[in-house]
Image (spheres, grey):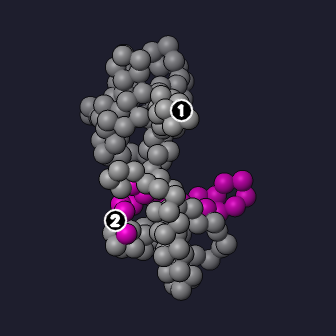
Amino acid sequence: MDRRRIEARASEIARSSASSLGLKVVDTEFVQDSGHWYLRIYIDKAGGVAIDDCADLSEVVGAVLDEEDFIPQSYILEVSSSGEKPLKSLQEFRDFAGRWALVSTFSEFRGRRRFEGRLLGVDGENVKIEVDGTQYSIPMSKIAHARLAVPVEEVLDDES
C-alpha cells in the first residue's frame, strides 16, 4: 500500500473516531523522519485541544489500526494539536486564516526569508500574512515550508 493510500485510510479511521470524542481531524500524514515512519494525526476542537484529547484519540485509533493491520512497516502513531501543523495547500492557508503561522521561502522575498505572523488568507496563488503590522502576499511557488505556530506572547502568558 502506498503512502497516500495509508494516509487516506488512516484519516477515515481517525475522522470517524474523532467525531464521537468531539474532535476534528485537520490533517493526517504518513512520513519518514530520521529513519522511522510516523503516522501523524493533527486534531482541533473548540476551546483548544488538551493532552487527554490526544491520548483518547490515539487509544481508539491505535486499536482500529492494530485490528485492520494495513500498514506494512512499523511506525509510530502521533496524535497532536493542530498548533504546529504543516500547511501544504492554498486551501489550508484559507482554512487557517486568522491563525498564527511561520512561513519560510526558498530564497529572499521582499528582504526576508522567514515570515511569522497572522495568516490573512489567500489571494489567487498568493498566501497573505501580516508580520509586525506589514502585510505580505507571498506566491505559493516561493514557499519552502509553512506551519501553524503559537505566538510568542501566548507562550509567555502561559509561563506567567
Residue sitting nearer the eye, 80 or 159: 159
Q: What residue type is labelled 1?
A: Ser
Q: Residue at x 26, y 31 (%)?
A: 123
Residue 145 appears in view:
yes
**Mark 1, residue position:** 160
- In what element is the residue under mark 2? loop
Residue 26 part of the magenta segment: yes
Q: Which of 68 and 108 is in front in this view?
A: 68
Q: Give the range drawn in magenta.
A: 21-44
Task: Label 1, secondary structure: give it.
Answer: loop
90 is higher (above) or lower (below) than 81? above
- State the predominant SS element of the stretch in magenta: strand
Quadrant in the rendering for residue 118: top left
In the displayed orientation, state which residue is furthest to the top.
Answer: 111
Task: Tell me what residue is drawn at x 39 percent, y 51 percent.
Answer: 48
Q: Residues within 10 Å of mark 2 (few under 14, many from 20)?
A: few
* Quadrant in the rendering for residue 27: bottom left
Q: Which mark is residue 11?
A: none
In the picture as drawn, the residue positioned furthest to the bottom comes out as: 67
